[in-house]
Image (cartoon, helix red, strand yellow):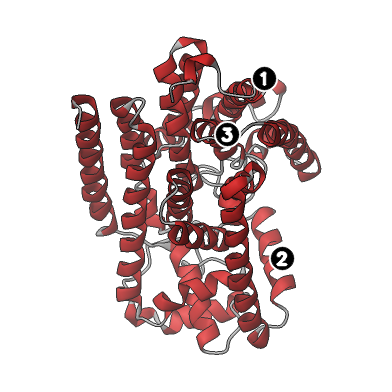
Amino acid sequence: MTNPRRDGFLLLVLASALFLAAGFVFESGDSASPDFKGIYYGTRCLLQHADPYKVSEVRRLYRDDAGQRPPDPPYSIYDPNRPFVMAQIYLPGTFLVALPFAVLAWGPAHFLWISCIVAVFVLAAFLAWNLAADHAPVLSACLLGFLLVNSLVLFTSANPAGIAVSLCVIAAWCFLRDRFFALGVLCLALSLTFKPHDAGLVWLYFLLAGGSYRKRALQTLAVSVVLGLAGMLWVSQIAPQWLPEMRANLVQNLHNGLDDPGPNAPYARTASTIIDLQTDLSCLRDNPRFYNPASYMVVGALLIVWGIATLRSRPSFPMALLALAPVVSLTLLPVYHRAVDAKLLMLAVPACALLVRQGGTAGRLALGTTAAAILFTGDIPLDLLVHLADRLHLPPTGLAAALLRILLLRPVPLVLLLMSSVSLWIYARCSRKPLLPTEMADL
């Protein structure tokens, strides 16, 4: 290894060690793992021929299994009067993937789930660094290392985003490096099964890019359809009304529930805050008839520009890196996402390293916006924003108060939108030429 590459690798090893050490300290404390509980007990419902989309059925099984797991925390932000388990909102294919965990008792299943999250998450960080190390090994290691040590919520919540995001990054590495095709297809298919709103636009890039990328995207789609249909067949035999029940759970969570983006929602002031664009727009007008269409219009316009640029550009390794940078930040904005989903930003680091190596205005803008996005979606900065919210007393109404609330307490969507716009501008400018700009001809 060259000295910078060796230094970057060692920096990332150190960050991984800190992530593991701090994570297991958190996990050995009062961790409730609410997100895994929903999937685990939902799948166990199916194994007992009960409806996983009926909250009463899941909570009955949860109470019956109380002796097999540590006691719940003293209270639940979900509902202080009920067990710490969420209503089921995942698609049926998720249960099929979670089946190997659900056949185990809670203790082994929980340990195996956390271990899988940690293993694939650290692997994804190193593979993202591998894509960036040829251009800026130390800088990319610093960005990815900061992202790693600010991902401890993955331990406490056990959110499947830790697996879905990591598998998406692993698949992108396989496709971009032109290696381990079958592994890449399987990883991206599993990611789409868990969280299609995380991996969907990354899959769309490979579909639009053409060539061998399109072939891998179509193979991924075939595997995803098989998993989805098998999951729906299994669920439909036990819970034929699963679709309206899932919709009802989503509506309940979105309106005055856990996933409500409004400024007064019960889950609005936690370190795992919602980060989609609706959270900022709701400060201006807390009405889904306003903030949902407005969010779709803003992100939709940017996605149209991105799609046109992708269709007219010639596929290459550098252009693929530049194409993925805007899409991984854009995917977080139009629909419900939390900070754990923003770990997908590790896939934007290679493009940042590529542009920093070239220098100039584009490199400075890419570094500033990418670093800001990773910073503001980290666990520690988000926790500091929570403490700031507790001490800051803003007027309840008025435009000035709404703008201050957005800038001081909810800056993440604005930072992501800025990063998306800058990276999209760079990508669109490069795509207008038949080849990369002259300064990138040697890459």
Location of residue 394 in the rendering, given as x and y in whole percent from the top left corner: 58, 26
Q: How many marks?
A: 3
**Placement of the C terminus among the 4 image quadrants:** top left
Tell me how far mark 3 sits from mark 1, CA to CA: 36 Å
Quarter where residue 55 is shown = bottom right
Quarter where residue 271 is shown = top left
Residue 256 vs residue 379, the one in the foreground = 379
* Residue 168 seen in the current view: yes
Which is more N-terminal, label 2 or label 1?
A: 2
Which residue has dot 2 on it?
Answer: 247
Tell me how far mark 1 sits from mark 2, CA to CA: 36 Å
Q: Residue at x 51, y 43 (%)?
A: 273
| Residue type for callout 1 | Ala
Location of residue 346 in the rendering, given as x and y in whole percent from the top left corner: 43, 39
Q: Nearer the viewer, mark 1 or mark 2?
A: 2
Callouts 3 and 2 close, C-beta under 8 Å: no
| Residue type for callout 2 | Arg
Secondary structure of the residue carrying tag 1 is helix
Which is more N-terminal, label 2 or label 3?
A: 2
Which residue has dot 3 on it?
Answer: 323
Above or below for 249 versus 109:
above
Q: Which mark is residue 400?
A: 1
Callouts 3 and 1 close, C-beta under 8 Å: no
| Residue type for callout 3 | Ala
Q: Which mark is residue 364?
A: none
* Residue 336 seen in the current view: no
**Placement of the N terminus among the 4 image quadrants:** top left
